[in-house]
Every structure is written in C-alpha cells, then in structure tokens.
Image (cartoon, rainbow, N blue to C red):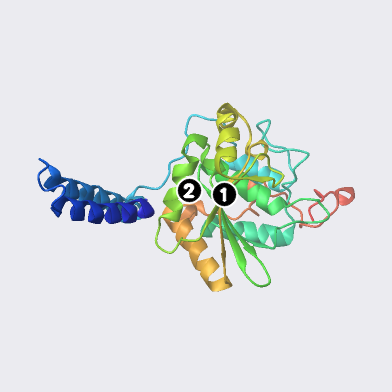
C-alpha cells in the first residue's frame, strides 16, 4: 500500500504538469485531475500508517465458547498420570505426565500466563514434550491463547499459539492484532497441519485450516494444528515480550484461582514425584 501511495504521488505530479501545460489547458475539467490523484495518494498513505494503530486499539481476540473443551480438573489429573473423567482429554500417543522439575514450571506458568521451557521441552524418556502438551491443554480448558518461552543458548523464542481459541476463521486477524501491538514487530506467522511441528504458511495454512473448522469445535486440542506467531529475541527482551502478551491476553491466573498442581484436590496423589509404579507410584519422572 505504501508503494502504491508513492506511485500515485509521481503520477499526480506528472498529471499536474500536463494539466498546466498549453496542451491540456483547453480541456474542461483537466485542472481537477491532479487534486483527485493527490486525494487517492493521501488515502493510500493514510491507510498504510493508520492500520497498525487500528490493530493496537482493537480488542484482544476472543475464544469460541460453543465447542468441546477439557476441564481444568482433567488436565491436572492427566498431568499426574491419572485417568481423566472425560474421554478424549489425553492421549496415549502424546504424553502429558510431568516430572518434578516440569511440575514446578507448570505451577509457575499458571500464575504468570506463559511457560518457560528449556529448548523445545523435549524429554527423551517420553519421546515428546509433556510440559508443552500439558500447558497447551490447560490453556484450551480456560479458552486462552498459549504462550511459550523456549530458552536457547543465544536467543530465546517466544511462541504465541492461537489454536486454543478454536476460531480458525479469525486466526489471521488475531495474529495481525498481536503483531500490531507496541513492541511486537518482527514476528513470523506459522501453522502446522498437525501437532508434529510440520509448518505451513500463507495461503496453504489458511486452506487446510478452513477444511478443519468442524474439528476445532469437536476435537481435543492434541489432535488440532497449531497456529502460531513466533519471535526471536535476546533473553531479557523475550521475557518482557512474553509478560506483555500474557497481560494483553489475560492468560494467567491470580489470587485464589492460582492453585498449585500438587494439591490432592487438583489431582496430585499422595506420593512423591519419581516413585515408580512398582512401589505404588504413578511412574512420574
């Protein structure tokens, strides 16, 4: 749009020169052409500079309410390796059971609104990332976007996953809203056709998302693709960005609602994490 406005300015200048020349002076209405072209250039330029302001002032994206979601109680139960009360909350093919270190990070994440993960969160014993899976399910249960801070050696990666909102038709607008906030420039929008991390972008992403609108209303989150906005930042900037997004999207819990997952009423059994099944534990660790 900015290039279009610049091009119109050049055209307006040429037309103005011709309109004032002796060749076109005798033509009726010729004097109005430059001003009309200038108006178009002003419209295009104004749209270019005001669009980010409109995104920044727009309300945050909303979550779908008429859809399948797990309960927070079931998410906590499967994080301890216990069966969920509602079928479909967990999956044998995607681990959610947390070890002691992941439990601490999960407890902190629920109050902060974003989870800090070392690298990708991959755990070789489980051949997956249980903390990422569990936090995404918890965000789905609450109907909020999931924010991950993946800590790297040089730079950190902040990932905003919009799939827990379960409104694929609005994902592009939600991503534009996130990128339109102050200090959120430079993000990259990506989508995965499944939970395995395969990425698509642009029209291909929108195409396969449009084919799965019904799935977002009926299927568990672990069967749904991610739609993410990703930023690469140094550690202090990445953490500040994650905090900013959590505040804007109200993803964290506070006060009495921010209970620890070790409470028995939230699914925690009366065993220490790490105790094996053979000795009466849940194989956590």
User: In this orientation, which residue lies closer to the viewer: 269 or 37?
Assistant: 37
Q: Are marks 2 and 1 in contact (CB under 8 Å)?
A: no
Q: CA distance from mark 2 to mark 1?
A: 8 Å
Question: N-terminal of the two: label 2 or label 1?
Answer: 2
What is the count of numbered marks? 2
Q: Can residue 205 be seen in the rendering of this structure?
A: yes
The quadrant the C terminus occupies is bottom right
Q: Residue at x 44, y 43 (%)?
A: 173
Give residue 259's position: percent from left, percent from top. 55, 54
Q: For numbered disc 1, what is the local secondary structure?
A: strand
Q: What residue is pinned by disc 2?
A: 175
* Crowd around label 2: few <14 · some 14–19 · many ≥20 (10 Å): many
Q: Is residue 126 left or right of residue 113?
A: right
Give residue 152's position: percent from left, percent from top. 67, 67
Where residue 207 sits, quadrant-wise, is top right
Q: Residue at x 76, y 50 (%)?
A: 128
User: In this orientation, which residue lies closer to the viewer: 237 or 29?
Assistant: 29
User: In this orientation, which residue lies closer to the viewer: 182 or 73?
Assistant: 182
Q: What residue is pinned by disc 1?
A: 228
- Compared to 235, does 125 lie above or below? above
Give residue 141's position: percent from left, percent from top. 56, 41
Residue found farthest to the front = 23
């Amino acid at each position: 749009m900015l290039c279009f406005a610049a091009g119109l300015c050049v055209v307006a200048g040429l037309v103005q020169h011709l309109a004032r020349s002796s060749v076109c002076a005798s033509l009726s209405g010729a004097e109005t052409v430059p001003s009309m072209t200038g108006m178009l250039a002003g419209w295009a330029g104004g749209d270019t500079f005001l669009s980010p302001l409109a995104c920044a002032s727009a309300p945050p994206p909303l979550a779908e309410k008429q859809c399948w979601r797990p309960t927070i109680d079931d998410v906590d139960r499967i994080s301890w390796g216990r069966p969920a009360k509602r079928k479909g909350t967990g999956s044998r093919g995607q681990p959610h059971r947390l070890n002691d270190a992941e439990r601490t990070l999960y407890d902190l994440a629920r109050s902060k609104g974003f989870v800090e993960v070392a690298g990708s969160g991959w755990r070789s014993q489980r051949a997956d990332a249980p903390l990422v899976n569990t936090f995404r399910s918890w965000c789905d249960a609450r109907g909020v976007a999931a924010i991950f801070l993946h800590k790297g050696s040089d730079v950190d990666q902040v990932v905003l996953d919009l799939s827990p909102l379960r409104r694929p038709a609005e994902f592009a607008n939600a991503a534009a809203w996130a990128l339109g906030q102050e200090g959120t420039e430079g993000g990259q929008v990506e989508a995965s056709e499944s939970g395995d991390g395969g990425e698509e972008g642009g029209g291909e992403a929108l195409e396969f998302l449009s084919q799965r609108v019904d799935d977002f209303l009926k299927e568990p989150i672990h069967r749904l693709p991610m739609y993410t906005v990703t930023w690469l930042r140094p550690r202090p900037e990445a953490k500040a960005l994650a905090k900013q997004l959590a505040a804007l999207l109200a993803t964290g819990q506070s006060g009495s609602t921010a209970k620890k997952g070790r409470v028995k009423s939230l699914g925690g059994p009366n065993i220490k994490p790490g105790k094996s099944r053979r000795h009466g534990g849940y194989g956590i660790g």
